[in-house]
Amino acid sequence: MPIASAFLVPGTPLPLLRRDNPPWEAIARGYEAAGQALAASKPDVALIYSTQWIAVLDQLWQTRGRIQGSHVDENWHEYGELPFDIRVDTDLAKACIASTAQIGVRSREVDYDAFPIDTGTIVATHFLLQGLDIPVVLTSNNLYHDGQTTESLGRLAAQAADAQGKRIAVIGVGGLSGSSFRQDIDIATDHIVNGDEDRANREMLALLERGDVAEVRQKAPDYAQSARVDMGFKHLYWVLGALGGQYRKARTHAYGPAFGSGAAVVEFQH
């Protein structure tokens, strides 16, 4: 596989919109470290799967050459707007669309002005691709696809890039544990709201760091269920698929809270 680099990153906008808050600033610094690693790997294109781009019928792929605008997060609108300017590798996106029939998945193009780009994609491209002239392939999180199907989509996307002679940065955008505070808090004291989920997050990160893919696969389903992981941890399966199901080890650049839920920036070394 033509892998330049691979990352698991959070989709929360809090480290971007309120970096002045210490618990969230640590995530921002981890994101920036990952961005430096991505830049050093010199990919031709970034393949991005965000749990926050929701689809319910077909698998959707962006094919508009350039998408620009400003987005207000539905949960954190009081913190301001999220501007974006993203260049899409249309040729590769169309090749990905053509490839999914072989696993029984119907895909469709998204190509119209003012399409609502999700928060996770905007945050990831801001931190990881800012200042870099790197196009992206963006695909959706179909709610009816399980981890196995999502892994297959990642594998097919990487194969399509290989067929075009392109080195890729693979990015899975999503959170860890899903519990959050149900009341207002002093954000300076933000922490993982559930102690059991905090321990489960740390155990999973340690597994990822060791590179024991077999054990990760064995424990990921129970972890996803018990810790209420964002979308069943499908963003991890996307990365694993693009990596061909294996990697040597991983590095956690940051781990911390996002209003009680878990967020981590992880770099995979293949």
Image (cartoon, rainbow, N blue to C red):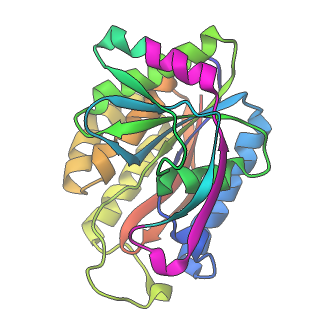
The residue under the point 67% across, 30% down is 45
Q: Quadrant of residue 88?
A: top right
Task: Measuring from the top left, give residue 18's x and y in whole percent.
Answer: 58, 77
- Image side of residue 138 versus residue 87, left or right: left
Task: Measuring from the top left, give residue 188's x and y in whole percent.
Answer: 50, 87
- Image side of residue 255 versus residue 70, left or right: left
Report how many numbered discs are placed on residues in the image. Answer: 0
Q: Quadrant of residue 191?
A: bottom left
The residue under the point 55% across, 14% down is 160
Q: Is residue 94 magenta?
A: yes
Task: Measuring from the top left, give residue 158's x and y in whole percent.
Answer: 54, 20
Q: Quadrant of residue 89?
A: top right
The residue under the point 30% across, 78% down is 181
Q: Quadrant of the C terminus?
A: top right
What are the residue bounds of the magenta stretch? 74-98
Identify which residue, 182 or 267, lies in the foreground: 182
- Say if 258 sits above or below 263 in the image: below
Residue extending furthest toward the bottom = 186
The reply to whether residue 212 is in sight is no
The reply to whether residue 52 is in sight is yes
- Say if 188 sits above or below 41 in the image: below
- Say if 182 sits above or below 11 in the image: below
Q: Quadrant of the N terminus?
A: top right
The residue under the point 48% across, 81% down is 78
Task: Measuring from the top left, give residue 21's x and y in whole percent.
Answer: 57, 82
Q: Is residue 63 magenta?
A: no
